[in-house]
Image (cartoon, grey):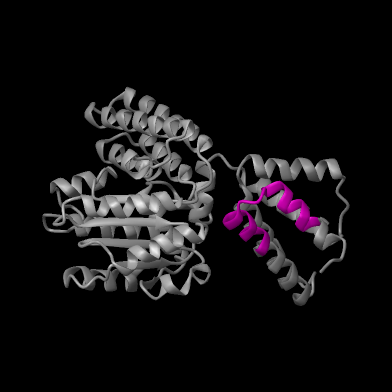
Amino acid sequence: MFHDIYGQLETVSQLQKSLRGESLPAALLFQGPRYAGRLSLAMETARIRSCVGSGESDCQCSNCRMSQVGGNPYTVLMLSRDVMPEIRAGLDLLQRVPNSDHVRFFMQQVRKLIGKYQSELFEDTSANAKLLLKAAFEIDEKLVNLESQPVNKKTAVLAEKISGDCEKLTGSAKSGNIPVSQIRKITTWSYSTPEHSAKTIILEGIEKISDASKNALLKTLEEPPNNTLFIIISEQPGTLPLTILSRVRKYQISERSWPDQERVISSVFEDDPDNYDSIKTFFMVKSGIDCRSLRSEAELYVTSLLQRKDIPYSILQGLLSKISKEKLYSEFITEAIQVLEEEVEARLIPPSKAAAVMHELHSAYAKNRYFNQNPALTLEALHNTIRYGLI
């Protein structure tokens, strides 16, 4: 159990005891930072629950084999995250070391994206919704073809096409919010599937959903379907309603140490950890992001915020537009916060001033993540607020 989960020994131990004793409640909350293994823990929990064999990581029962490729019909993933970094990393692994295990790993990453595009989970009948469902169905068909053919030179070519299709699907989709209709559909799906089957519903991003969606989820958690486990993944559990928090068992997922991050990079992705300074950097590099350039842009932005350097308006607009277009908002904010922390450490800025600026940066992050405000406009407003002395 939990063979490839590194750095979360206490949480893994607690989950193993609960799974072996069949004492899990109807809902769990995995709270903690990104890149700490929250989703991996959730997916492994779902696999173990549905297993009809030994439950161990090498189990080859029918349900475990389906879980290996992300195709277990009794596991639903509703994720708000951008999963393209995981898909690209899976593609890179398959291209470097082509074998059947890596084909299955790549398939699992892709199905993190298309898992929520199932007709039985959609009530929306708009033209755009139909296009999304059709695109996801075609990607799934290609995955089936990928798994059925022998691993050869064509394998990487087909996988690359699938990755490109995923890019298009991601670009066509709207925000990661889960509409109330889909929450209700999930509940209906739970009741309509065989009661003896262990069903797991993994939800990420419920901080962003509407009050109606939260109320629908709360109603389901109050009267959960039999043999159904809800796993909620959250970076900011403090933003969740107390009524929901009171109905979940909480698990704290801590940020991994560097040795544990190294093990993930070397063991799971079979890459050299010496080429990266964190798992986050690993995924950014696999996504084609120039980390040095991003760092330089964050430094330029911060020095302008603090009135140490004048940036022509056209350059500022170009920088913010680039960050928005390339969907690097959260990474940019994180880099800017790190620059501020280093400035405090070097005593270039008073801690009180830094704290006020960091508060505004975190607020800007929340405005985009939870309220879908335009990244470029949010960063420009933040720049003007701080630079012209409004804090």
Which residue appears at 16% of the width and 52% of the height? 194
Q: Is residue 105 left or right of residue 175?
A: left
In the rendered image of this protein, does residue 43 appear above or below residue 140? below
Which residue appears at 14% of the width and 45% of the height? 62
In the rendered image of this protein, does residue 384 appear above or below residue 136? below
Which residue is at the front of the view, 56 or 93? 56
Q: Which residues are magenta?
A: 363-383
Q: Main secondary structure of the magenta part?
A: helix
Residue 137, picture quadrant: top left
Which residue appears at 24% of the width and 48% of the height? 67
In the rendered image of this protein, does residue 348 appear above or below residue 272? below
Q: Is residue 190 left or right of residue 135?
A: left
Residue 379 drawn in magenta = yes
Which residue is at the front of the view, 213 or 18? 213
On the question of residue 199 being in view, the answer is yes
Q: x%, y% of residue 86? A: 43, 45
Quadrant of the rendering where the N terminus is positioned? bottom left
Q: x%, y% of residue 29? A: 38, 67
On the question of residue 37 being in view, the answer is no
Q: x%, y% of residue 21? A: 17, 73
In the rendered image of this protein, does residue 142 appear above or below residue 3? above
Residue 372 drawn in magenta = yes
Residue 388, picture quadrant: bottom right
